[in-house]
Amino acid sequence: GAVVSQHPSWVICKSGTSVKIECRSLDFQATTMFWYRQFPKQSLMLMATSNEGSKATYEQGVEKDKFLINHASLTLSTLTVTSAHPEDSSFYICSAARDWSPLEQYFGPGTRLTVT
Amino acid sequence: TQLLEQSPQFLSIQEGENLTVYCNSSSVFSSLQWYRQEPGEGPVLLVTVVTGGEVKKLKRLTFQFGDARKDSSLHITAAQPGDTGLYLCAGVDFGNEKLTFGTGTRLTIIP
């Protein structure tokens, strides 16, 4: 149990366009979902925390108008990178938790975004 | 925001050798986790430690949480090529319900 999927696994888009990444909890209901960003050979950096039915909480330095997060149901959260630029190219990883505890996160396989 | 420094940053050793990876911070954690991440995949949880001084063993892996809850170590005995990956510690500090990841240790086991 506790499987989290992401779609797409990789995406290439042109500069100025928007791209949506989906995160789904396949076999459990996720009250909380987290979005992370990982640059090559670096660690994971938390971008935002989302709770079902409410607005996401963004970390300092993360532009909420650029990285739109929607957690519309207990099994789906989406991250939309708007007006993407090459510097947004990164590995985006989501995680899902049954409750508020950050210790009970189950991570997705990640989405590789390349902006040309 | 706590900063979790891992050392070494890179480690390449021969199969069969032992190794230790360290995770240090100036802040106190309420709990700490260790993950392993393969290239192009999400991190996979190895262990959670919650008590200062706690030692947990998972087959050839031994995890220790410092008495002061500011540091942790991961010891691998008789390393195998399958142990290759990025090892990440991650901590939760008191009153902050977020997981902060360490800087990572990239381990390569040479057959």
Image: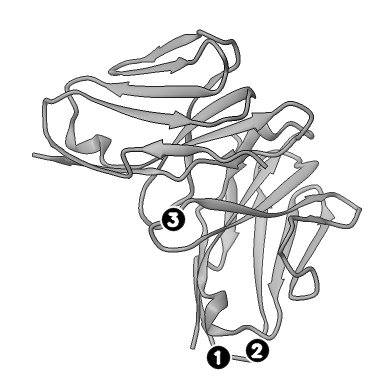
Q: Which of B49 and A5 is in front in this view?
A: B49
Q: How crowded is mark 2: few (under 14 residues within 10 Å), some or many (20 or more)?
A: few
Query: Residue at left 19%, top 28%?
Result: B79
Q: Find residue B100 and report its horizontal and vertical position in percent.
A: 61, 41
Q: Find residue B105 and report its horizontal and vertical position in percent.
A: 35, 42
Tell me where residue B29 sits by quadrant. Answer: top right
Outermost residue, front direction?
Answer: B26
Q: Nearer the viewer, mark 1 or mark 3?
A: 3
Q: Element type at marker 3?
A: loop
Q: Element type at marker 1?
A: loop
Q: Residue tagged by mark 3?
A: A42
The span from disc 2 to disc 3 (Cα, nearest Å) is 26 Å
Label number found at residue A17:
2
The span from disc 1 to disc 2 (Cα, nearest Å) is 6 Å
Q: Residue tagged by mark 1?
A: A14
Query: Residue at left 91%, top 53%?
Result: A54
Evaluate if marks 1 and 2 touch, with contact meaning CB atoms under 8 Å apart: yes
Outermost residue, right direction?
Answer: A54
Q: Find residue B20 and report its horizontal and vertical position in percent.
A: 29, 25
Three-letter code, disc 1? Lys
Three-letter code, disc 2? Thr
Query: Residue at left 59%, top 10%?
Result: B51
The span from disc 1 to disc 3 (Cα, nearest Å) is 24 Å
Three-letter code, disc 3? Gln
Looking at the picture, do discs 1 and 2 lie on one chain? yes
Q: How crowded is mark 3: few (under 14 residues within 10 Å), some or many (20 or more)?
A: some
Going by the image, does A12 lie left or right of A79?
A: left
Position of the N terminus of chain A by quadrant: top right
